[in-house]
């Protein structure tokens, strides 16, 4: 069970391991893009490429769907970024349980957006957790965890890719460990933190935060929903930025020359390195400044 790109390496790893995948369950096709084209989830594309049967139920909490799954008599149900909470009657189906791969070191960052929130909060280390699912939201017992360092300047987009591959490898080791009796479920230990789903409005920049916090915020919001601000009536996506020492008024343009674009915050300056004005392509700060006449100390981001 999985839907987006994050789940694709896990499915590919199971295929490479010659696992007997009886069924792939994913979300229904959705309309995407400006052309409003009906597009299949990435997991579905990979499954069909390998001749694996795909189910896309509109609802999973039905007697009919549970009976369909039960007919396979599954050893495992593997869940990676499926996007729905499984009811108890499905959790109880597989002989060895439902195994979920989650993009954090649980109990940190339970919820829908663990990768983004780890960056927003300035974590230096993150990872993946393979857990035995229960009825709670990411509360199941831990089977195996794998940790990695977060690189300087890393965005949610790049971290997604690395954790997806790490999750796939961890899943393979988890299945082998459960089959040979090496792994035993262990209750989660420590204070939980949460990673709620992000909405488009969550990307609006609050210039009254510190430059350091905003630099993490920009990284966590890239590629979606993106950190967004306004200048001169138009919106601008901030794609890359870093905190530097300095003093300025929150939101005020403190430096706009020599290819340097720096904005005041509550503490320090946010040096913007890459941005995307509304209706235009992404560009460097130098390219942005070359096409505009901005006055230092007069212009304000809001």
Image (spheres, rainbow, N blue to C red):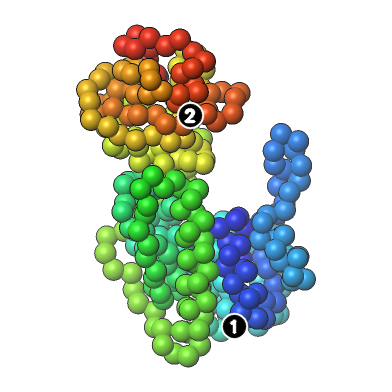
Whole-percent x and y of residue 48? 76, 65
Q: Horizontal and vertical percent for residue 295?
A: 38, 9
In which quadrant is the N terminus drawn? Answer: bottom right
Horizontal side of 260 relative to 24 (left or right) equals left
- From the top left corner, tell me how far across and down residue 116 is, in percent: 43, 48
Q: Residue furthest front?
A: 258
* Residue found at x 35% / y 77%: 186
The residue identified by callout 2 is 284
Give the label on residue 75, or none: 1
Mark 1 Cα-neighbour bin, 10 Å: few <14, some 14–19, many ≥20: few
N-term mark: 2 or 1: 1
Determine whether, in the image, residue 79 is placed left or right of residue 49. Answer: left
Q: Mark 2 falls on what kind of element?
A: strand
Q: Where does the C terminus fall, quadrant-wise? A: top left
Of circles 2 and 1, the one toward us is: 2
Q: Nearer the viewer, residue 226 or 138?
A: 226
């Amino acid at each position: 069970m999985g839907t987006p790109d994050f789940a694709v390496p896990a499915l590919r790893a199971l295929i490479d391991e010659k696992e007997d995948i009886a069924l792939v369950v994913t979300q229904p096709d959705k309309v995407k893009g400006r052309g409003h084209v009906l597009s299949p989830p990435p997991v579905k594309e990979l499954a069909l490429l390998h001749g694996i049967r795909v189910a896309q139920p509109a609802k999973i909490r039905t007697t009919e769907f549970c009976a369909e799954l039960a007919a396979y008599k599954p050893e495992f149900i593997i869940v990676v970024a499926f996007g729905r909470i499984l009811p108890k009657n499905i959790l109880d189906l597989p002989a060895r349980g439902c195994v979920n791969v989650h993009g954090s070191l649980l109990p940190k960052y339970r919820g829908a957006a663990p990768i983004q929130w780890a960056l927003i909060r300035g974590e230096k280390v993150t990872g993946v957790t393979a857990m035995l699912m229960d009825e709670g939201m990411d509360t199941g017992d831990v089977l195996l965890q794998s940790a990695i360092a977060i690189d300087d300047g890393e965005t949610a987009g790049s971290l997604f890719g690395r954790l997806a591959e790490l999750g796939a490898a961890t899943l393979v080791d988890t299945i082998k460990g459960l089959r040979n009796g090496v792994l035993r479920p262990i209750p989660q230990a420590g204070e939980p933190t949460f990673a709620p789903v992000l909405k488009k409005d969550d990307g609006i920049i609050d210039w009254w935060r510190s430059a350091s916090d905003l630099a993490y915020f920009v990284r966590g919001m890239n590629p979606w929903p993106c950190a967004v601000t306004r200048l001169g009536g138009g919106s601008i996506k901030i794609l890359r930025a870093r905190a530097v020492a300095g003093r300025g008024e929150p939101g005020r343009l403190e430096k706009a020359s020599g290819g340097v674009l720096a904005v005041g915050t509550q503490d320090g300056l946010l040096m913007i390195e890459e941005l995307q004005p509304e209706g235009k392509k992404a560009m460097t700060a130098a390219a942005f400044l070359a096409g505009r006449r901005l006055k230092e100390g007069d212009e304000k981001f809001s």
